[in-house]
Image (cartoon, rainbow, N blue to C red):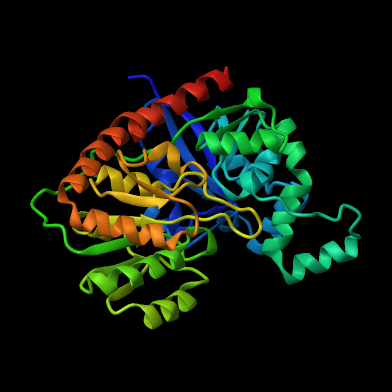
Amino acid sequence: MESKKTVIIYRDQLIPYSETFIPAQVENFLSYQGFYVGSSGFPIAKSMLPQDRTIILGDLASPGGFWKTAYKLTGFIHPRWLKCLQDLSPQLIHAHFGLDGFLALPLAKKLKVPLIVTFHGYYATTEIIINQSQSLITQTRNFVKNRGQFFRELYFRNRDRLFQEGNYFIAVSEFIRSQLIEKGCPPEKIQVNYIGVDVDKFTPNPLVKREPIVLFVGRLIEKKGCEYLIEAIAQVQKTIPNIELVVIGDGILRSSLENLANNLLSNYRFLGVKPQETVQEWMNKAFLLGAPSVTTATGESEGLPIVILEAQAMGLPVISSIHAGIPEAIVHEETGFLTQEKDGESLAKYILTLFENVELREKFSTLGRRRIETEFNLKLNAAKLEEIYDNIGT
């Protein structure tokens, strides 16, 4: 049996709970084996990633904070970390998200391998104003006071360099590809490759009865648009009081959204972050998923939310918005409903329509699942990504 080739999967912080799609993709490779590499790690990553294939700078170098900062600011690679990566003899590095792609450039150069970067949402859609003449003292102050903003600005200062020096870029939707081209990325370097979902894992249990539950799954941040779903459910509950909103996820807007729900709704639950198995259970018994994504004040938008694909694979109809790559996954009035952004009235109307029309729900369920099987099948799309690796690595 031919041994698998090695690819480094770079995510500077390995990995938030919302990024299970990364290992899901990697663990479905047939001819490549992925090693997860970053400068630091979240505690939750221990249960999400194979630890024998996870190599974190902060675990190898002491003091970890110093060496992580040194790498990200200067590109200096700690010898022990470098040796571990050289021993892998990788074919290439595949980074997720724009900033991580820039941060991986020194590794790619030192290892003398190609760099591929997948763009999902923020770094492809947001534009911020950068003061290029900012003094070193001001930049240092920003680094100390607001490190997150400092590194976001670091990306935008070096975006053109990444587009020039990176070998290839993956867009998670046609919308993201168009945004990258608009931002100056050479079109010939970009290919769309949907991540997709495991249709064998995400499959409905016909023995579970659907209940009057509208489900929301996602981070509680501006671009997810949860407030508009709460407002829509408030309208729906005037007609059908027993419809319940169940919110799974967490984020900086949680307290304000809970206050809004408390003021407007008679029947709701905020469950916080839940494991994937629990999310699937809720997808199996809800009668629809609400995903009313919006463009933020800074222009940030989604790429293509994986939860929409997962729900359709589970036979769960989705009501979402005409936003980013979502219309690539949902065909309006054929596999689900789409509204304009921030349109609570249309959301409410479609929720009532689906609640009252069992035949339409069954149609959306069947056709939605079929579309995921053909266009957003994780195994098929992982195989396409491996073909891209082969073409870049040769």
Q: Residue at coordinates 34% horizontally, 31% vertically from top-left?
A: 379
Q: Residue at coordinates 30% horizontally, 33% vertically from top-left?
A: 371
Q: Quadrant of residue 218?
A: bottom left
Is 320 or 388 nearer to us in this picture? 320
- Quarter of the image with the C terminus in it: top right
> Can the viewer see residue 11 in this picture?
yes
Is 279 or 92 nearer to us in this picture? 279
Number of disc labels: 0
Residue 236 picture location, percent across and down: 30, 68
Is 110 or 123 nearer to us in this picture? 123
Vertical placement of residue 126 versus 189, above or below:
below
Residue 388 picture location, percent across and down: 51, 23
Q: Residue at coordinates 68% horizontally, 32% vertically from top-left?
A: 166
Residue 3 picture location, percent across and down: 40, 24
Q: Is residue 82 left or right of residue 19?
A: right
- Quarter of the image with the N terminus in it: top left
Q: Is residue 319 left or right of residue 194?
A: left
Q: Is residue 186 left or right of residue 365?
A: right
Is 112 or 331 nearer to us in this picture? 331
Residue 342 picture location, percent across and down: 49, 59
> Can the viewer see residue 50 in this picture?
no
